[in-house]
Image (cartoon, helix red, strand yellow):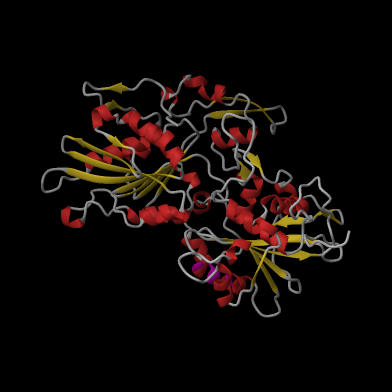
């Protein structure tokens, strides 16, 4: 959203007269590192400052042979609706068309600004689909601004980073400065930023080389703004009984309500929402209805990484497509241990299948392991571009994938199968235990995999939202179903005469048999 609310001061030509809303914003605007990320609460002026940075870089660019300072930028957000209604709106508030030139709303949206000796070309890109990422690969930019970095995976960030510094060309003098700037609210613990900056520990199974590859480079900057509020603690020193304004909060001068902005903002909000959006803490905020509300991290997540146990079958669930995922698990004495996750971005089965094979060899060394692999039934469909199905590709790597037993790939059946396991107990212990190594799946099950709220109503969509968390969640469903868990929901509603049936002693399955 447009974060500034106080009327902006402009000069006689209508150009903005900007004043940073705090020391962190001032540092962000003046920083010239090749990568600079600023993180802060909502309303803290990050988007506004990022727009100003682009204009400053355009003015700092050395002139070409014709005396013109040319730069080209990409402004990136994860979805087109958010890009158009929030990012572009903020941009045009600062650089209105009547002063800076016509804005083109065709896709991709563009703004070409010519003021004096400055020529600034800005492309606005929504990178929420693999094909959008492929479009980015053919582009050349001076700099990239990623708005709301918390929604962007590292693969996309890396791709954007590789496109900076390519305009102007070296033969035309090159870029005076080039790189990536980004703003973000709090990220989830599975996001690459807190992992690279050391705010969350690396997975225990990572090798020293893998840890080193994810270390925050020395030449990059990571700036954190103060929280909008301070907690008021109770007499026990542990419980939060209220909030008060943080005198160090930034950007209050530009917010409607000023010092009272955050106090009004948190009215009626949950503690999780306040921690995430105002206190700037790494947490999980759910904007919708969680698919599996019975999932509880304190109950269903192990304290330490789970290790595979020899002698028991290893089940693997696969989700295909351009953002494929794999989940590995075992059933030990009638209790699930979900061990590892593997996810890729913008690759097909020909790339993902050897990744899965390599994971099997690394995680389960030696012989004697028995794998049972189950995938999305749609993976048997032949794509239009070639004759091989995803199942054929995996078979070429000696991975025999079976379709998960869910007729018509019924979503309701898949979700209820996982819910059935989550609610189960065995010998007084929950039947589902997730390794903390499964960072993305953990956050998905906490609610990032959710039913989207239908705008203007109190209702929710019937199917879960497709996002970066849905792929590992789908793979989990195929894992659970393939191993025989769940209720016999084939073609029926919960209220019908479908009955759970036994597939193995002490187990329930989706295979229909005599009641």
Answer whether residue 305 is visible to the viewer in this image: no
Which quadrant, please, contains the C terminus?
bottom right
Q: Position of residue 395 (x, y in %)?
A: 59, 75
Q: Quadrant of the N terminus?
A: top left
The one of 81 and 186 positioned closer to us in this rendering: 81
Give the residue displayed 41% in from the left and 37% down from the top: 84
Q: Is residue 352 above or below residue 45?
A: below
Q: Quadrant of residue 6?
A: top left
506 lies above or below 94 = below
Q: In the displayed orientation, state which residue is furthest to the left.
A: 66
Q: In the rendered view, does 125 fall on the left or right side of 437? A: left
For residue 416: magenta? no
- At a point 46% along the width and 51% down the height, the residue shown is 129
From this viewpoint, is residue 221 visible?
yes
x then y, percent, for residue 409 = 66, 57
Q: Is residue 334 left or right of residue 142?
A: right
**Snapshot quadrant of residue 162:** bottom left
The single residue placed furthest to the right in the displayed view is: 515
Magenta residues, start to end: 351-357
Query: What residue do we see at 28% from left, 49% from top?
Result: 142
> Which SS type dominates the magenta stretch?
helix
Name which quarter of the figure residue 281 lies in. Answer: top right
The answer to whether residue 228 is above or below residue 289 is above
Queried whether the magenta region covers residue 355, the answer comes back as yes
């Amino acid at each position: 959203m447009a974060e500034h609310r106080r009327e902006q001061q402009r000069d006689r030509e209508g150009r903005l007269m900007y004043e940073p809303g705090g020391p962190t914003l001032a540092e962000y605007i003046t920083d010239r590192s090749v990568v600079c990320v600023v993180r802060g609460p909502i309303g803290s002026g990050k988007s506004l400052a990022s727009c100003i940075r682009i204009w400053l870089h355009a003015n700092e660019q050395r002139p070409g042979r014709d005396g013109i300072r040319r730069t080209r930028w990409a402004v990136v957000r994860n979805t087109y609706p958010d890009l158009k209604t929030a990012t572009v709106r903020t941009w045009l508030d600062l650089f209105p068309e009547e002063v800076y030139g016509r804005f083109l709303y065709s896709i991709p949206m563009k703004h070409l600004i010519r003021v004096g000796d400055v020529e600034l070309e800005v492309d606005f890109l929504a990178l929420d689909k693999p094909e959008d990422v492929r479009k980015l690969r053919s582009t050349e930019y001076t700099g990239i601004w990623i708005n709301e970095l918390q929604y962007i995976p590292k693969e996309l960030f890396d791709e954007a980073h590789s496109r900076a510094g390519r305009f102007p060309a070296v033969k035309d003098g090159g870029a005076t400065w080039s790189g990536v700037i980004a703003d973000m609210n709090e990220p989830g613990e599975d996001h690459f930023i807190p992992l690279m900056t050391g705010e969350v520990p690396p997975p225990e199974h990572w090798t020293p080389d893998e840890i080193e590859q994810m270390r925050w480079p020395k030449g990059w900057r990571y700036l954190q703004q103060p929280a909008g509020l301070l907690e008021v603690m109770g007499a026990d020193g542990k419980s939060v009984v209220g909030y008060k304004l943080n005198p160090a909060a930034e950007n209050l001068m530009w917010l409607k309500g000023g010092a009272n902005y955050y106090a009004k903002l948190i009215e009626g909000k949950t503690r999780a929402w306040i921690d995430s959006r105002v206190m700037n803490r790494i947490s999980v905020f759910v904007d919708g209805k969680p698919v599996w509300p019975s999932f509880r991290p304190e109950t269903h997540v192990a304290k330490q990484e789970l290790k595979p146990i020899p002698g028991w079958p290893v089940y693997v669930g696969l989700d295909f497509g351009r953002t494929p995922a794999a989940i590995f698990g075992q059933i030990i004495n009638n209790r699930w241990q979900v061990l590892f996750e593997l996810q890729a971005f913008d690759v097909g089965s020909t790339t993902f299948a050897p990744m899965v094979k390599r994971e099997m060899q690394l995680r389960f060394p030696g012989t004697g392991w028995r794998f049972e692999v189950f995938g999305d039934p749609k993976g048997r469909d032949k794509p239009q571009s070639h004759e091989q199905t995803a199942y054929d590709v995996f078979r070429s790597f000696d991975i025999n994938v079976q379709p998960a037993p869910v007729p018509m790939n019924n979503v309701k059946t898949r979700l209820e199968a996982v819910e059935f396991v989550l609610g189960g107990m065995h010998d007084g212990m929950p039947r589902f235990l997730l390794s903390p190594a499964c960072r993305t799946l953990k956050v998905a099950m906490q609610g990032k995999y959710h039913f989207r709220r239908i705008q203007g109503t109190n209702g929710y969509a019937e199917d879960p939202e497709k996002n970066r968390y849905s792929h590992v969640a789908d793979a989990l469903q195929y894992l659970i179903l393939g191993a025989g868990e769940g209720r016999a929901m084939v073609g029926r509603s919960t209220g019908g005469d479908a009955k759970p049936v036994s597939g193995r002693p002490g187990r329930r399955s989706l295979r229909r048999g005599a009641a």
